[in-house]
Amino acid sequence: MKMTALKMYDPQIYELINQEEARQSGTLRMIPSENYVSKAVMEATGSCLTNKYAEGYPGKRYYEGQQVTDLIETLAIERGKKIFKADHCNVQAYSGSVANLAVYNGLIEPGDTLMGLSLTDGGHLTHGWKVSITSRIYKSVSYKVRPDTGLLDFNEIEDLAKKHKPKLIISGATAYPREIDFTKFEAIAKKVGAYHVSDIAHISGLVVAGIHMSPVPYSDVVSTTTHKTLRGPRGGLLLSKQEHADKIDKAIFPGQQGGPHMHTITAIAVALAEADTPEFMAYARQIVKNSKRLASKLMEVGFNLVTGGTDNHLILMDLRNRNIPGKKFAKALDRARIVTNYNTIPGDTAPPANPSGLRIGTPAITSRGMKEDQMDIIAGFMNRVAENIDNESVIEQVEKEALMLCSMFPIPEHFIIQHREN
Ligand code: DSN
């Protein structure tokens, strides 16, 4: 990136940014929640909108000078409503965590019970996990996936819901490699009189592209981050039925936040327009093709995968048959320029700080243009690292080959061929 002022005024930070850019370019980034944004999104993020306070909502602000911010936020809202086919969209949440908390604040009362997927089985901290503030404000009940199949067990979820009578059931995950049937969550929530909230942070890009079932018709509120498969800046988005619009908006502002980050909202608007294109649909389809191909190659070379494969952008590897702790494997892969994260697997007896699994995903490498052939190569890299986990010379050789592969797929600046009206 051209950053002449930064180079002049803070050469140390300038240098560190350049180093990070080189790292992102020279590694196979396979953390499933990461991606590369377009230059257009990056430019909007770094624009003068960072200078503007805009407490309130378009047309109802508490500061003057909103001639432009109102237009931008309205565009972001309309674009969000359009691509997710939602009644209402709020684009102000600073992140997914804040968005989730606002949904709870908007819909239920402190002390009420909420039910979400256990963190160790692929849920998120904010789904009521014990170290999260969400479990201190609300009574939290966690459901799990079946330890034998790794799949959601709707009979168990229904039994738990009937027993604990939660006011809110949250569906969605951060480490679940299969399609989630939101209709089943809706049916259970209806039976016990709970709100159904879906957190689609990981899969929102796939939902927009119609590759994953959309929860929008089956949920009271849908929450997502904007920077994972959706490929926007780091932020949060809330989609809801019209009847909840006012509660959700008030929970975000003034309930939890002050001034919205207008530079982020501007970049979200850009990303949502990018997501409304045939190129984005093709990218989303390729994410899943890549993920499925990578999963099948990994199994072919002897890795066990939780649920035996994937339907989405994510693969959860169970490393117990290879006798390699997750952290050791993640660190060895990092030395080989393959960036992943160690993760618990269902029923894991190892501690979360050194669990038995590894979580990988294909969004970022797909954004670079990699396809099925490259997935075969990457599966081979991962197997060689696993087979030679204590042999640094083999890891160094893989590192060289991974760098070569990266050099053939430079970070793209643009994903969309032409600007479209929307
Ligand atoms: N849980 C993070 C992830 O999936 O990487 C996001 O909060």
Image (cartoon, rainbow, N blue to C red):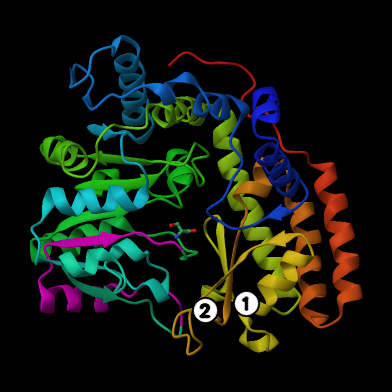
Considering the image in quadrants, where does the N terminus appear? top right
Q: Does residue 125 appear to the left or right of 327 in the view shown?
A: left
Quick check: marks 2 and 1 in contact, CB under 8 Å? yes
Residue type at mark 2: give it: Ala
Determine crowd level at label 2: few under 14, some 14-19, many 20+ residues with C-alpha closer than 10 A: few
Specify whether tag 1 is near ligand 1 (CB below 8 Å): no
The residue tagged 1 is 327
Q: Position of residue 10 (x, y in %)?
A: 65, 34
Compared to 88, does 207 lie above or below? below
Cα gap from disc 2 to disc 1, whole angstroms:
8 Å
Compared to 249, does 346 lie above or below? below
Considering the image in quadrants, where does the C terminus appear? top left
Q: Does residue 251 appear to the left or right of 100 in the view shown?
A: left
Residue 384 found in image quarter? bottom right
Residue located at (68% from left, 48% from top): 365
Q: Magenta stretch: residue 260 in it?
A: no
Q: Nearer the viewer, residue 40 or 253?
A: 253
The residue tagged 2 is 353
Q: Position of residue 170 (x, y in %)?
A: 26, 60
Residue positioned most to the front: 9
Residue 61 found in image quarter? top left
For the record, the magenta segment spans 149-174
Please tell me whether mark 2 sits on a helix, a strand or a loop. loop
Residue type at mark 1: give it: Lys
Would residue 214 be seen by someone viewing this image from the given angle? Answer: no
Residue located at (84% from left, 43% from top): 408
Determine crowd level at label 1: few under 14, some 14-19, many 20+ residues with C-alpha closer than 10 A: many
